[in-house]
Amino acid sequence: MSIFGKMKVVGCALCLAGVLGGAAVAQEEALPAGKYTLDPYHSTLVFSVSHLGFSDYVMSFDRFEAELELDPADPGQAALNVTVDPASLDVPRPPEGFLEELMGESWLNTGAHPEIGFVSTGIEMTGGESATVTGDLTLLGVTKPVTLEVTFNGGYAGHPMDPNARIGFSAEGAFNRSDFGMGYGIPAPGTTMGVGDEVTVRIETEFTGPAMEEKKD
């Protein structure tokens, strides 16, 4: 390797060390209280239902927004508000006409109900980095309570390359779609011939928060 090649490798190593060192320092700083907004580029909303009892059919929504009011010193008082665009449904390899059917009156009925909403109503800390979040889910104009099991994956108060606070969560939950008036295709009792009633939801998300304060001498 030429001397220029060696210098390039050393330079990259020093740059990486600086980034990692900055991240380590940032993680040690306390997260600021305030409004945290969903980072749509690092968030996924996936759900699944049983198909004939043979497999779980997995779909996702591509457009959703969320705001989180958070005081890290008192996370049990946090407030979460989520809106989902049901017309952004993403189905892997849908048969011809299938997406249009799912948007219709028997399923998501996006013409009459262009938004799905979730508003938290209570947060119970179940561990140092876990919580049960209860909230009101509004689907097809019906509002019912739904519970999510949430894990806090970490965060930082800011970083030289990412000056805003950042936090990450994983969440899982389930509900019956028939509770919201979506009963089409549910198997008859004692059979699995159809599409299951239970909807399982999995969320991976990051939020960005207040910008880090500048250091004072």
Image (cartoon, rainbow, N blue to C red):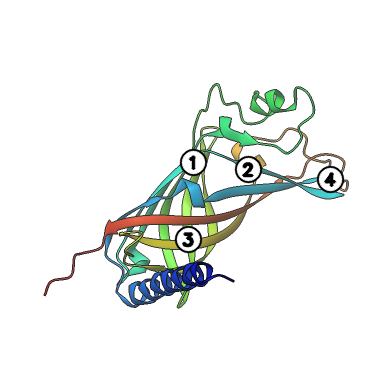
Please name which of the two marks, 2 or 4, marks the residue nearer to the observer: 2
Q: CA distance from mark 1 to mark 2?
A: 11 Å
Please name which of the two marks, 4 or 1, marks the residue nearer to the observer: 1
The residue shown at (18%, 65%) is 214
Mark 3 lies on residue: 133
Specify the label residue 215 is tagged with.
Answer: none
Left or right: residue 98 versus residue 129 is right
Mark 4 lies on residue: 189
Q: CA distance from mark 3 to mark 2?
A: 21 Å
Q: Position of residue 118 (x, y in %)?
A: 47, 46
Mark 1 lies on residue: 64
Q: Nearer the viewer, residue 207 or 128?
A: 207
Mark 3–mark 4 contact, CB under 8 Å?
A: no
Q: Earlier in the sequence, mark 3 or mark 2?
A: 2
Please name which of the two marks, 3 or 2, marks the residue nearer to the observer: 2
The residue shown at (29%, 73%) is 30
Please name which of the two marks, 3 or 4, marks the residue nearer to the observer: 3
The residue shown at (73%, 32%) is 184
Q: Nearer the viewer, residue 110 or 11?
A: 11
Query: Which amino acid, mark 3?
Result: Val
Mark 2 lies on residue: 60
Q: Earlier in the sequence, mark 3 or mark 1?
A: 1
Q: CA distance from mark 4 to mark 1?
A: 34 Å
Mark 1–mark 2 contact, CB under 8 Å?
A: no
Choose top left, top right, bottom left or bottom right for residue 19.
bottom left
Q: CA distance from mark 3 to mark 4?
A: 31 Å
Q: Position of residue 88 (x, y in %)?
A: 57, 33
